[in-house]
Image: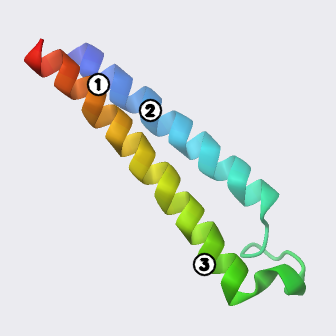
C-alpha cells in the first residue's frame, strides 16, 4: 500500500511541475502581456491543464489497477 501511495505522490508532483512549467510558458493569468490574456488563450490553457490532469489520473488508475488485479 505504501508503494501505491508513493507512486501517487510521485505522479502528483510530476503533474504540479508540469502545470508550473505551463504557467511559466503562458503567463496570461499572472500579470503577463494584455494581448495574451484573451478568453481564447485562457480557455486553451484551461483545456491543456485539464488534459494533463486527466492523463495523469488515467496513468495513476492504470498503475493502481496493475497493483490490485495482478
**Residue drawn at point x = 28 percent, y = 30 percent:** 62
Asked whether disc 1 touches disc 2, contact meaning CB atoms under 8 Å apart, the reply is yes
Left or right? Give the position of 54 relative to 39.
Answer: left
Query: In terms of secondary structure, where does tag 2 sit?
Result: helix
The residue at 33%/41% (across/down) is 58
Q: Mark 3 falls on what kind of element?
A: helix
Q: x, y percentage for residue 35?
A: 88, 85
Is 34 rendered above or below residue 7?
below
Mark 1 or 2: the one toward you:
1
- From the viewer's perspective, is 45 left or right of 25? left
Residue highlighted by disc 1:
63
Real-space CA distance between mark 1 and mark 2, rounded to the nearest whole angstrom: 10 Å
Residue at position x 60%, y 78% from top? 43
**How far apart are the two marked residues, 3 and 2, measured between alpha carbons?**
24 Å
Q: Earlier in the sequence, mark 3 or mark 1?
A: 3
Please tell me whether mark 1 sits on a helix, a strand or a loop: helix
The dot on residue 11 is: 2
Sequence-wise, which precedes: disc 3 or disc 2?
2
Closer to us: 11 or 52 = 52
- The first of marks 1 and 2 along the sequence is 2
Q: Are marks 3 and 2 in contact (CB under 8 Å)?
A: no
- Judge left or right: residue 35 versus residue 51: right
Rendered position, 67 above or below 57: above
Q: Nearer the viewer, residue 63 or 32?
A: 63
Contact (Cβ within 8 Å) of mark 3 with mark 1: no
Q: Which mark is residue 30?
A: none
Placement of the C terminus among the 4 image quadrants: top left
Task: Indicate the quadrant where residue 1 lies.
Answer: top left
Q: State the image coordinates of residue 32 (x, y, percent, origin top left).
A: 85, 75
Residue lying farthest to the left in this orientation: 69
Q: Residue at the location (22% across, 26% down)?
A: 64
Residue that numbered label 3 is attached to? 43
Amino acid at each position: 500500500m505504501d508503494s501505491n501511495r508513493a507512486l501517487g505522490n510521485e505522479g502528483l508532483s510530476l503533474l504540479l511541475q508540469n502545470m508550473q512549467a505551463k504557467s511559466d510558458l503562458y503567463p496570461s493569468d499572472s500579470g503577463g502581456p494584455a494581448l495574451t490574456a484573451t478568453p481564447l488563450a485562457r480557455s486553451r490553457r484551461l483545456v491543456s491543464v485539464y488534459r494533463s490532469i486527466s492523463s495523469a489520473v488515467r496513468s495513476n488508475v492504470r498503475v493502481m489497477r496493475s497493483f490490485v488485479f495482478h
